[in-house]
């Protein structure tokens, strides 16, 4: 039978469980005597009977009339089988909603006609898009509390239409209901809502198209495990999309090995030559290929992208904050990989669904777009192409701290042809030997702000303190490594990309790389941050254009004014100030000496202290060469 999986979401107490209980009762999907039994139990406990008691199986849920965990129940109709998923609406239980709704085809999104569209309604609309639920039936419930007012219905419908359009979810119907009394639940045409001429909730559900999982889609199987039977190695997995057939050529990712399907294995044993999306299947290959849990099976022409960096949208469920440098485990498909947060690019404002005023940090129940990196090459799908394997959960230890989807792969290149070679020395060993962590200390600011002057003095003081440090300066790098680049926007982007990768290698070796570059564009600095990950420290050497031009140490401002230097940052070229720099050093008010001390104090705290607490660099010890 054609099966449809529908998750019911909405703010707490807007009537989700009541609606589902009523649907089950009126479609004959409850055991005989179940409602009578629940009425008797409610009477014995001294509480009013609620239709939500049909689903609220946990004792604590009945006591509080709040759904805590997701509940799945099968509802058969003459047209199709519907799997109803009652997801928690209370803010504290969003984790269960994300995991419970992760495989839904569509949603029932409920709004209380009296209370209207709440913050939690907005959050749930975003979550549907986030976990890849493409369409919804909107139920404007408790119309009795709004006096069955057509104007109230029209106003909420207009607000929800605008919300879902921004969230990227298609609504197929807006049904006004009184679920407690069953109005417009199974049959449309409630006389108290004569203004409405659309389908009932049940009719709208039955009419929903099932998410495409047909054989025409590219093949995707997440390998669940390998079992041995006699001399055979049988690969086990669920076909997420496409179809698998004997004789078909497949690709094993991330290894990139091609093979051919020798047989399909099912129980009880019988001949089978084709398996389609949604089936769990065993199969053998035409040779002794190494396949492991977490690998992805695809056809060669539509393989997942191999990469180590990607952008994702997630709901942060952790009790702490999510920021750059955080290390977690990510589970997608059947693979679990160690990942690190390179940056939190934006936190979404729940009211406007636009970018919030965040500081690059996500807090509990925030929805954010985040860039992750991984030391291993991962086979990645994006949610727009293959939603099944693009969904993930994020783990901190054993705790689920986020759920989300992969939006974009960032570093494709030739990753599939490269095998990362791991050093035999890790960062902790190098740090113990050097007495400090490796780091990228990235100075950005207008020409003449004092970047190079401060960088060279910081390098000298670090050297005196026994640290491994080296300055990468714009002029020096452009005379060698990047002497093939000009100053067009494209060449500026490539200049910073190369320097960011180089500085990250310095940091990986245990060196404190001090990168002194104008780096006028935020996106380029974000690229450099992604390369170094948690080792990256952005320091904004701040001075206004007038102050910098008054100094003009290299005469560049004068040349720019005369037209001799086109696209000069600060005159004819734009500079995008950092929004979330780790440190701001204002050289329009600080002396060079004070600015250097400020930077060294930061390095003491963030780079030295974790390895050698108390090892201050602030006491100056001049080099012998500086003495007369």
Image (cartoon, rainbow, N blue to C red):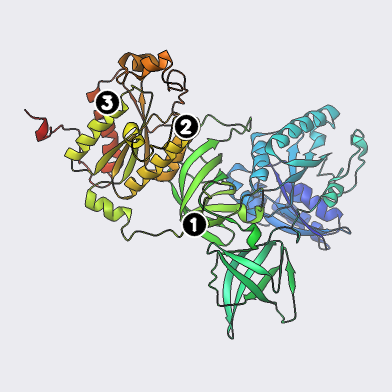
Q: Nearer the viewer, residue 219 or 88?
A: 219
Residue 445 sits above or below residue 182 on the image: above
Q: Position of residue 229 (x, y in %)?
A: 60, 83
Q: Secondary structure at mark 2?
A: helix
**Residue assigned mark 3:** 595
Which badge, 3 or 1, comes first in the chain's sequence?
Answer: 1
Q: Assess disc 2: are there few (<14), some (14-19) or many (≥20) residues with their C-alpha within 10 Å of its C-alpha.
A: some
- The answer to which image quadrant residue 254 occupies is bottom right
Instruction: Please report the residue visible at 63 percent of the width from the left and 62 percent of the height from the top.
Output: 300
Q: Secondary structure at mark 3?
A: helix
Q: Position of residue 615 (x, y in %)?
A: 20, 41
- The answer to which image quadrant residue 136 occupies is top right
Q: Secondary structure at mark 1?
A: strand
* Position of residue 587 in the picture relative to residue 90 (left or right): left
Instruction: Please report the residue visible at 23 percent of the width from the left and 49 percent of the height from the top.
Output: 434
Which badge, 2 or 3, comes first in the chain's sequence?
Answer: 2
Q: Position of residue 80 (x, y in %)?
A: 84, 58
In the image, which is nearer the foreground, mark 2 or mark 3? 2
Alpha carbon separation for disc pair 2 and 1: 26 Å
Q: Position of residue 565 (x, y in %)?
A: 42, 20
Q: Quadrant of the C terminus?
A: top left
Callout 3 touching callout 1 (CB < 8 Å): no
Q: Assess disc 3: are there few (<14), some (14-19) or many (≥20) residues with their C-alpha within 10 Å of its C-alpha.
A: many
Residue situated furthest bottom in the rendering: 230
In the image, which is nearer the foreground, mark 3 or mark 1? 1
**Residue assigned mark 1:** 377
Alpha carbon separation for disc pair 2 and 3: 23 Å
Q: Please tell me the numbered disc located at residue 522.
A: 2
Instruction: Please report the residue visible at 65 percent of the width from the left and 40 percent of the height from the top.
Output: 126
């Amino acid at each position: 039978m054609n099966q449809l999986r529908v998750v019911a979401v909405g703010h707490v107490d807007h009537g989700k469980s009541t609606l589902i209980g009523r649907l089950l009762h009126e479609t004959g999907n409850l055991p005989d005597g179940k409602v009578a039994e629940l009425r008797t139990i409610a009477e014995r406990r001294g509480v009013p009977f609620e239709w939500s008691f049909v689903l609220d199986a946990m004792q604590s849920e009945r006591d509080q009339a709040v759904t805590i965990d997701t509940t799945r129940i099968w509802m058969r109709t003459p047209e199709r089988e519907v799997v109803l998923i009652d997801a928690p609406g209370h803010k504290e239980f969003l984790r269960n909603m994300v995991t419970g709704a992760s495989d839904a085809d569509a949603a029932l999104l409920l709004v209380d006609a009296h209370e209207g569209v709440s913050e939690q309604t907005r959050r749930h609309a975003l979550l549907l898009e986030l976990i890849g639920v493409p369409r919804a039936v909107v139920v404007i419930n408790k119309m009795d509390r709004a006096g069955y007012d057509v104007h109230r219905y029209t106003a909420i419908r207009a607000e929800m239409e605008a919300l879902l359009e921004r969230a990227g979810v298609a609504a197929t119907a807006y049904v006004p209901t009184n679920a407690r009394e069953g109005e417009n639940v199974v049959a449309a045409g409630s006389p108290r809502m004569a203004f409405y001429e659309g389908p009932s909730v049940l009719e709208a559900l039955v009419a929903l198209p099932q998410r495409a999982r047909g054989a025409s889609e590219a093949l995707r199987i997440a390998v669940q495990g390998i079992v041995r039977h006699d001399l055979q190695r049988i690969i086990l997995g669920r076909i997420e999309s496409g179809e698998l057939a004997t004789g078909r050529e497949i690709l094993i990712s991330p290894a990139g090995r091609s093979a051919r399907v020798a047989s399909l294995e099912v129980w009880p044993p019988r001949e089978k030559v084709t398996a389609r999306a949604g089936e769990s299947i065993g199969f053998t290959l035409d040779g002794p290929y190494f396949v492991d849990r977490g690998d992805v099976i695809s056809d060669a022409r539509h393989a997942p992208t191999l990469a180590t960096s990607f952008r994702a949208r997630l709901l942060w469920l952790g009790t702490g904050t999510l920021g750059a440098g955080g290390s977690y485990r990510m589970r997608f498909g059947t693979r679990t990989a160690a990942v690190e947060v390179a940056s939190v690019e934006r936190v979404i404002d729940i009211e406007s669904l636009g970018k919030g005023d965040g500081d690059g940090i996500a807090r509990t129940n925030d929805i954010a777009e985040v860039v992750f990196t991984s030391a291993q090459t991962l086979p990645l799908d994006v949610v727009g192409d293959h939603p099944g394997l693009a969904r993930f959960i994020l783990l901190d230890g054993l705790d689920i701290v986020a759920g989300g989807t992969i939006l974009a792969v960032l570093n494709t290149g030739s990753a599939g042809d490269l095998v990362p070679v791991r050093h035999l020395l890790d960062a902790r060993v190098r740090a113990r030997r050097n007495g400090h962590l490796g780091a990228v200390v990235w100075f950005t600011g207008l020409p003449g702000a004092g970047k190079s002057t401060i960088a060279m003095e910081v390098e000298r003081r670090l050297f005196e303190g026994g640290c491994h440090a080296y300055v990468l300066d714009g002029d020096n790098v452009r005379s060698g490594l990047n002497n093939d680049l000009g100053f067009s926007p494209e060449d500026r982007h490539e200049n910073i990309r190369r320097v960011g990768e180089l500085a990250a290698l310095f940091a990986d070796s245990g060196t404190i790389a001090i990168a002194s570059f104008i780096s006028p564009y935020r996106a380029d600095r974000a690229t450099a941050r992604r390369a170094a990950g948690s080792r990256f420290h952005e320091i904004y050497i701040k001075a206004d254009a007038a102050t910098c031009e008054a100094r003009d140490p290299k005469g560049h401002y004068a040349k720019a004014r005369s037209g001799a230097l086109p696209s000069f940052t600060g005159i004819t070229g734009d500079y995008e100030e950092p929004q979330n720099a780790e440190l701001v050093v204002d050289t329009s008010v600080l002396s060079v000496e004070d600015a250097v001390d400020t930077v060294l104090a930061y390095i003491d705290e963030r780079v030295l202290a974790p390895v050698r607490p108390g090892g201050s660099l602030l006491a100056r010890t001049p080099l012998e060469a500086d003495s007369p």
